[in-house]
Image (cartoon, grey):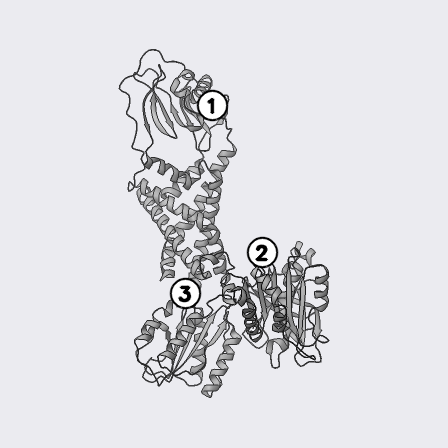
């Protein structure tokens, strides 16, 4: 519901938000430009200024001071009305003054869309829509990252989603301020809210009479500081009871031109002061730095409107379109889907089509459409993601409540497949809740709960294989997600380890296909060949020949290193690993980059504990390579045999020597008295406990089995200081990249 609450006003008001954001950004430059061209003077009274101005402009009619401090004199010369900017110190002209026609046009567009009352209603409605978007967007962002304390953590999702949320984090405060103040000002303009401007001082019924005194000698004007002036209107010559009209920041009054006395005065009401403060906060007039900040946020609003529309369009494109969907009561297999952004539906569609291809009657629907009974169903397959802090996604929000009112179904077996991201403390929590609820209600379990990390196509295929074996059919699930455009790279170098082993390992280093390997930086400067941007820990998506499904490999280098490096173990029968191991220097491949910002060392000088096994050392070696600040880094790594596959040994020795790596702890399993990496952790428990208690971050990369053993070891190590993996995850200090 919150997402719909956010999307609807965004879609309706997207064009107006973009229009007002762009025009507001242009107008935000005016206070800064005006301030740069203004000569300020302190300790000058209004009387002194008026006297100087009158010397140079005998026909002066009005002096106006803008919030930025610019002084404008309106006067008559040769019967023509004129205006000039003047120097407060001398009263002489700086330059003729003429309001910019372009600025006036943009201001009219921004305020009313050239439609007077109807336009002001439209802009006011847009401000309210923006306010609603800011509040709902903030709540969505908090749910997405897992709580208020996690607002600064790295973002996940596709590129549009990440950039949308990243810009929102920066621009949200300014947009919220602009929306609040804009809505208030629109209400005041339309007469819905009082602005206090109606409170004028009483016009004096009589003056002292006699000859007008020099303006520089008038007591009331001498008491008024120039810094507080807004406007001084001179008396109309020859008119009886003519007076000076004085407007200041505190209030307005009338001054006797003969005696210099303040004839009447009215201080600004609280309502008017509030309106003027809100006006200043909205326009930045008098606060030029705020104006520039709000202008930048306005451009951020333009970006958010555009990317928001793109995300909505992508979500519409991902909506379920299930072909050959059997009726719920006739189907022997029911697939129910829980999804927030419709991404899980892609997996459900592949499963539906694969089961249908072997003659199964399949009905696929959202989890919220759980029926009280299914006439012919023999199995219930649930594919669901988790939203926020372990909550149900949109299409499953009513599932548990519906399930609670249904009687047990002993004739229908169930299996739950969860989708999530292991970087979050509540990884696949809703899938776990659904699995437990079905079991508690007496539904017979068909398969143990399976969890898929970051929409892994490989893990999905393995689950499908297990399901097929149980059903006695060959079930090949190939989910091919939409991926970014690929880039062409050429293999520059390969370093082989454990060649005599069945599962050998190779480090592959690639450069742009047009690069000769020695002139990368020059080529980039000339715009010929360049690497896409990536960082160690990001993922390279490789699509092997003959398969539509990409395989992902963690990057062991940054693009600034001038190469793309991956570490690959050859798996028996592995399509992609066999392909990559067959590459020779000079061969070219196509791949794409999938950012993985959740798996990065924290910024700053906090110690980082790196834990890995096998090819999991790849991104960890990349982190160490780029630790040019020589912050504390501790590596615990497990391999098989130091004589055959001590991966990155020369590099690690060099990193120890130049202090990019603080300590190295290795464990080898295929030697006498072999050990695993978790054994090294337990041996160094006191040091690890002290580092983590002091704020250290832990990054783990390798197989899921290794990661499970590491979690158990660290929970044991941290128990004496009342810490555990779950609490570290919640703080963003424990992150995994497992496969």
Front tag of 3 and 1: 1
Front tag of 2 and 3: 2
Does the residue at mark 3 contact the one at mark 1 (Cβ under 8 Å)?
no
| Percent coordinates x, y for residue 369 in the rendering | 33, 73
The span from disc 1 to disc 2 (Cα, nearest Å) is 51 Å
For the N terminus, the image quarter is bottom left
The span from disc 3 to disc 1 (Cα, nearest Å) is 64 Å
* Element on which disc 3 rests: helix
| Percent coordinates x, y for residue 612 in the rendering | 61, 70
Q: Residues within 10 Å of mark 2 (few under 14, many from 20)?
A: few
Q: Which residue is mark 3?
A: 316
Q: Quadrant of residue 253?
A: top left
Residue 582 in view of the camera:
no
| Percent coordinates x, y for residue 260 in the rendering | 36, 17
For the C terminus, the image quarter is bottom right
Q: Residue at x 60, y 79 (%)?
A: 574
Does the residue at mark 2 contact the one at mark 3 (Cβ under 8 Å)?
no
Q: Residue at x 71, y 62 (%)?
A: 656
Q: Which residue is mark 2?
A: 603
Residue 505 in view of the camera:
yes
The span from disc 2 to disc 3 (Cα, nearest Å) is 37 Å
């Amino acid at each position: 519901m919150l997402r719909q609450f956010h999307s609807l006003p965004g879609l309706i008001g997207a064009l107006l938000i973009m229009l007002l954001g762009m025009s507001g950004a242009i107008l935000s430059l005016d206070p800064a430009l005006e301030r740069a061209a203004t000569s300020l003077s302190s300790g000058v009274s209004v009387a002194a200024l008026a006297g100087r101005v009158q010397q140079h402009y005998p026909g002066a009619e009005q002096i106006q001071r803008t919030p930025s401090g610019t002084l404008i004199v309106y006067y008559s010369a040769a019967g023509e009305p004129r205006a000039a900017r003047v120097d407060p110190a001398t009263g002489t002209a700086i330059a003729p003054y003429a309001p910019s026609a372009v600025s006036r046009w943009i201001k009219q567009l921004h305020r009313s869309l050239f439609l007077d009352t109807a336009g002001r209603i439209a802009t006011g409605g847009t401000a309210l829509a923006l306010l609603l978007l800011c509040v709902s967007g903030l709540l969505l962002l908090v749910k997405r990252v897992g709580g208020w304390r996690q607002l600064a953590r790295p973002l996940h999702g596709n590129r549009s989603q990440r950039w949308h949320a990243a810009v929102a984090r920066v621009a949200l405060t300014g947009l919220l301020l602009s929306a609040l103040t804009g809505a208030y000002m629109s209400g005041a303009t339309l007469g819905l809210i009082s602005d206090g401007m109606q409170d004028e001082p009483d016009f004096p019924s009589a003056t002292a009479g006699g000859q007008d005194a020099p303006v520089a000698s008038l007591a009331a004007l001498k008491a008024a500081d120039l810094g507080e002036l807004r406007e001084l209107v001179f008396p109309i010559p020859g008119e009886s009871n003519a007076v000076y009209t004085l407007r200041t920041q505190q209030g307005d009054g009338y001054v006797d031109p003969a005696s210099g006395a303040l004839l009447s005065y009215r201080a600004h009401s609280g309502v008017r002061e509030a309106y003027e403060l809100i006006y200043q906060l909205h326009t930045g007039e008098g606060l030029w730095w705020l104006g520039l900040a709000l202008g930048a946020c306005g451009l951020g609003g333009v970006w958010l409107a555009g990317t928001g529309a793109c995300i909505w369009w992508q979500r519409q494109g991902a909506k379920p379109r299930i072909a050959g969907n059997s009726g719920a009561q006739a189907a022997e297999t029911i697939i129910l889907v829980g999804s927030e952004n419709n991404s899980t539906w892609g997996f459900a569609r592949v499963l539906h089509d694969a089961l249908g291809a072997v003659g199964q009657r399949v009905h696929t629907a959202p989890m919220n459409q759980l029926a009280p009974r299914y006439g012919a169903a023999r199995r219930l397959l649930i594919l669901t993601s988790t939203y926020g802090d372990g909550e149900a996604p949109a299409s499953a929000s009513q599932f548990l409540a519906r399930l609670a009112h249904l009687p047990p179904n002993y004739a229908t077996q169930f299996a739950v497949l969860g989708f999530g991201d292991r970087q979050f403390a509540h990884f696949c929590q809703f899938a776990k809740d659904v699995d437990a609820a079905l079991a508690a209600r007496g539904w017979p379990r068909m398969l143990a709960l399976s969890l898929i990390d970051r929409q892994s196509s490989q893990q999905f295929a393995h689950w499908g294989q297990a399901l097929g074996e149980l059903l006695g059919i060959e079930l090949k699930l190939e989910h091919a997600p939409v991926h970014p455009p690929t880039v062409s790279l050429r293999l520059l170098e390969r370093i082989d380890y454990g060649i005599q082993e069945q599962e050998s390992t190779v480090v592959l280093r690639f450069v742009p296909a047009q690069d000769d390997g020695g002139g990368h930086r020059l080529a980039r400067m000339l715009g010929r060949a360049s690497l896409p941007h990536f960082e160690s820990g990001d993922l390279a998506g490789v699509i092997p020949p003959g398969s539509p499904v990409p395989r992902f490999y963690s990057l062991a280098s940054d693009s600034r290193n001038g190469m793309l490096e991956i570490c690959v173990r050859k798996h028996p029968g592995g399509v992609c690993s066999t392909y990559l191991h067959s590459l020779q220097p000079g061969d070219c491949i196509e791949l794409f980059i999938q950012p993985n910002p959740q798996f990065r060392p924290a910024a700053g000088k906090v110690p980082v504990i790196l834990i890995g096994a096998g090819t999991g050392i790849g991104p960890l070696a990349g982190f160490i390579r780029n630790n040019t600040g020589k912050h504390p880094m501790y590596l615990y790594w497990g391999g098989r045999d130091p004589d055959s596959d001590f991966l990155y040994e020369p590099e690690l020795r060099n990193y120890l020597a130049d202090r990019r790596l603080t300590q190295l702890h290795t464990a080898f399993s295929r030697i006498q008295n072999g050990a695993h990496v978790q054994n090294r952790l337990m041996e160094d428990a006191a040091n690890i406990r002290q580092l983590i208690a002091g704020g250290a971050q832990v990054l783990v990369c390798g197989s899921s089995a290794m990661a499970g053993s590491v979690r158990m070891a660290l929970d044991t190590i941290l128990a004496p200081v009342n810490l555990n993996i779950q609490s570290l995850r919640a703080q963003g200090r424990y992150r995994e990249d497992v496969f």
